[in-house]
């Protein structure tokens, strides 16, 4: 009876609404976050992730309120991210009912933040989110697959190699990695399995695959080929193509340990 | 009925409080670090997250060790996660920390039991262990009532108590498998404690909490 692989519906929240973009731009409304979260909870989601995609300080209160409301009705783990800059942000989100806090840009500017946050609150609640894009490192003259990480919701390149970064973040105390392929995000072409597999085998902490799910086969591939510990998806669930329950059944039918 | 949830200022207690208020709407649920409130409460929940060393430091700073020991001796108590690990004699975490010693044995890092440490080539497992694991109910207990054997519960931890501890099998009420079998639920008289998070384990977790609110130890 190994640990079950997790299915995590992701709610990108903008100003109190669930939205969904394609390749990080082009937004479509997907409903009220509390209602959406309740629906996924009923369908058997293993966890729910909220990402505040615009993450300005004035919207922070909106997100705290959403987290509070969801946490009072949904008794499965909640991960919240977007615009986390200080230990106080982590504290406020945990107090609002989040179980795990996802950090992206701040980790890049100040890697020690991950050390501080994980030693203060415990590794189990610090998730490092990595947005990565396949890139050619022309100056290095080798042909291996490489990925570069981006910050600011995918708007700023960093020059940092995604695999090296994942290893460093695990060393700094991150408890989990939320790995999004920017090439795949919103395209429905499937996860970047090479990227997922490279990060998953390079670190000893759990890896959540994200970005690009278009069908249930992609979720299965994320675990079986990518070696992911959890698979995250948004649009296939938001717009009613598949229920979480259907996704879980398909994964179990494929021989994956799943909580039904 | 008053239920005290011990607040050590570490981790998120809101989920525990809200889950209890859903399963026991008539109970007075108090998240507190007040000795008097804990002493007066009918039941006590002892949650915990993060590092056990930090947990004990907060327990001592808030001068709660005596009231916790008194409660362990006399009223229904539920330990959760680090609140379970703290009941053992010793925890390896933070360079080694003495526990409350209600159960003998040591809480150890998962890596002690995996792969090469185990003398075999079993697969490398991710730590922290994070996710849903089936729990086998070794013995009947009031807190298991209405919960099917081998139900899934949500775990987040890097340290665990081995089922092969010096206590023998009689204290183990539930076990789960992550490279080796470890204690998922442990109990003695008026005390029940779980390694998983019932407040995050959907309907089965809520059922366990409801059973606790109706259990007289």
Image (cartoon, coloured by chain):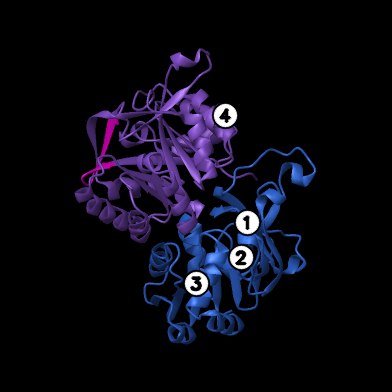
Which residue reaches farthest right? Answer: B119
Query: Mark 2 vs mark 1: same chain?
Result: yes
Write down the residue under mark 2. Answer: B85
x then y, percent, for residue A228: 53, 34
Write down the residue under mark 4. Answer: A224
- The local crowd at label 1, few if under 14, some if 14 to 19, many if 20 or more residues have their Cα within 10 Å, is many
Cα separation, mark 3 vs mark 4, equals 43 Å
Q: Chain of mark 3?
A: B
Cβ atoms under marks 2 and 1 closer than 8 Å = yes
Q: Chain of mark 2?
A: B
Q: Choose mark 3 or mark 4, whichever is in front.
A: 3
Q: SS for tag 1?
A: strand
Q: Residue at x 75, y 65 (%)?
A: B169
Q: SS for tag 4?
A: helix
Question: Would you place residue A18 above or below residue A60 in this image?
Answer: above
Query: Mark 3 vs mark 4: same chain?
Result: no
Question: Would you place residue A208 above or below residue B28 in this image?
Answer: above
Q: SS for tag 3?
A: helix
Q: Residue at x 77, y 67 (%)?
A: B166
Cα separation, mark 2 vs mark 4, equals 34 Å
Query: Mark 2 vs mark 3: same chain?
Result: yes
Q: Choose mark 3 or mark 1, whichever is in front.
A: 3
Highlighted magenta segment, given as a residue range: A13-21
Cα separation, mark 2 vs mark 1, equals 8 Å
Q: SS for tag 2?
A: helix
Kindly identify which numbered label has been placed on residue B58. Answer: 3
Q: Residue at x 47, y 26 (%)?
A: A218
Q: Does residue A85 appear anywhere in the picture?
A: yes
Q: Quadrant of the N terminus of chain B?
A: bottom left
Q: What shade has chain B been given?
A: blue
């Amino acid at each position: 009876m190994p640990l079950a692989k997790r299915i995590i519906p992701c709610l990108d929240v903008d100003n109190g609404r669930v939205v969904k973009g394609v390749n990080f731009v082009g937004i479509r409304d997907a409903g009220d976050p509390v209602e959406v979260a309740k629906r996924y909870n009923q369908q058997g989601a293993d966890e729910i992730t909220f990402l505040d995609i615009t993450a300005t300080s004035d919207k922070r209160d909106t997100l705290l309120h959403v987290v509070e409301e969801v946490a009072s009705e949904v008794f499965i783990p909640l991960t919240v991210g977007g615009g986390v800059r200080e230990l106080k942000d982590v504290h406020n989100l945990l107090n609002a009912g989040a179980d795990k806090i996802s950090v992206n840009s701040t980790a890049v500017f100040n890697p020690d933040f991950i050390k501080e946050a994980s030693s203060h609150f415990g590794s189990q609640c610090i998730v490092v989110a990595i947005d990565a894009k396949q890139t050619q490192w022309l100056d290095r003259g080798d042909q291996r697959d490489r990925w570069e990480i981006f910050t600011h919701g995918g708007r700023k390149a960093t020059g940092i190699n995604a695999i090296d970064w994942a290893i460093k973040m695990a060393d700094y105390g991150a408890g989990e990695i939320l790995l999004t392929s920017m090439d795949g995000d919103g395209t429905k072409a499937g996860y970047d399995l090479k990227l997922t597999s490279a990060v998953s085998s390079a670190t000893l902490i759990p890896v959540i695959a994200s970005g690009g799910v278009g069908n249930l086969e992609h979720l299965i591939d994320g675990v079986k080929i990518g070696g992911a510990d959890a698979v995250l998806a948004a649009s296939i669930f938001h717009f009613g193509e598949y229920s979480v329950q259907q996704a879980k059944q398909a994964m179990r039918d494929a021989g994956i340990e799943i909580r039904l | 009925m008053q239920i005290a949830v011990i607040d050590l200022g570490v981790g998120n207690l809101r989920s525990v409080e809200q889950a209890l208020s859903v399963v026991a709407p008539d109970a007075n649920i108090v998240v507190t670090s007040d000795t008097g409130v804990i002493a007066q409460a009918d039941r006590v929940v002892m949650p915990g997250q993060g590092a056990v060393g930090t947990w004990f430091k907060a327990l001592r700073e808030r001068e709660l060790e005596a009231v916790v020991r008194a409660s362990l001796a006399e009223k229904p108590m539920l330990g959760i996660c680090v609140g379970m690990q703290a009941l053992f004699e010793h925890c390896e975490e933070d360079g080694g920390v003495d526990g409350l010693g209600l159960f003998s044995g040591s809480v150890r890092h998962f890596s002690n039991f995996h792969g090469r440490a185990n003398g075999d080539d079993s697969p490398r497992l991710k730590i922290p262990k994070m996710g849903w694991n089936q729990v086998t109910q070794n013995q009947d207990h009031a807190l298991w009532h209405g919960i099917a054997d081998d139900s899934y519960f949500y775990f987040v931890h890097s340290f665990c108590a081995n089922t092969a501890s010096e206590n023998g099998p009689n204290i183990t009420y539930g076990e789960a498998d992550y490279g080796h079998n470890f204690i998922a639920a442990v109990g003695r008289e008026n005390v029940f404690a779980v390694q998983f998070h019932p407040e995050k384990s959907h309907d089965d977790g809520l059922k366990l909490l409801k059973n606790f609110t109706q259990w007289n130890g």
